[in-house]
Image (spheres, grey):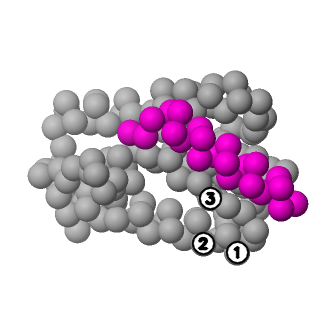
Amino acid sequence: MASLETTKQTRVRMSRQKSRNTQVEIALRQALHAAGLRYRVHLRPMKGVRREADVVFTAVKVAVFVDGCFWHGCPEHATWPKNNAEFWRNKIEGNRKRDLDTDARLAEAGWLAVRIWEHESVEVAAGRVREAVESRRRTK
């Protein structure tokens, strides 16, 4: 198993990382609300899946996840730490696998998972979410 020793500075920085209500999430929610969409926040889309979506449209079964570039291994911006490299690679790859599993479980149950990267423009991301919701409303 990889060493888990970190510097005090790293521990402090990582402990301050928010997992909910990040600036990106709030900006996305504001844009969606301004577009007239109503949603639930930080909700498990379905029973039996212990994963929480950041924004959920229950009536049309759309779950939105705002993924951080570091934590979810963004293909454009992911960085691989040099300290505890094996630990972090396993952690991030595990997150990627969990994301794929979540998307598959939701799809199997009739849900649509929409993944937004933290670096995406809020307008573009909100447009993708709005289109997904409206498309599902039309087919309902």
Q: Which of 101 and 120 is in front in this view?
A: 120
* First in residue order: circle 2 vs circle 3: 2
Residue type for callout 1: Glu
Question: Is residue 39 rendered to the left or right of residue 99?
Answer: right
Instruction: Work out whether 96 lies above or below 18.
Output: below
Q: Can residue 115 be seen in this view?
A: yes
**Image x and y of residue 82, in percent:** 12, 52
Say if the magenta span includes residue 124: yes
Query: Which of disc 3 and disc 1 is earlier in sequence?
Result: 1
* Residue shown at the point (68%, 52%) measured from the top left: 132
Query: Residue placed farthest to the left in the image?
Result: 82
Say which element carries label 2. helix
Between marks 1 and 3, how big is the CA–CA gap?
Answer: 11 Å
Predominant SS along the magenta part: helix
Mark 1 lies on residue = 108
Q: What residue type is labelled 2?
A: Ala
Check residue 91 for magenta coloring: no
Place of residue 99 in the rendered image (x, y in percent of width and height, measured from the top left): 50, 62
Give neighbour class at mark 3: few <14, some 14-19, many 20+ (Cα, 10 Å): many
Label 2 sits on residue: 104
- Residue 125 - label: none
Label 1: few (<14), some (14–19) or many (≥20) C-alpha neighbours in 10 Å? few
Q: What stretch is highlighted in magenta?
A: 119-140
Q: Residue at x 58, y 65 (%)?
A: 102
**Label annotation for residue 113:** 3
**Residue 135's image quarter?**
bottom right
Which of the 4 image quarters holds residue 21? Answer: top right
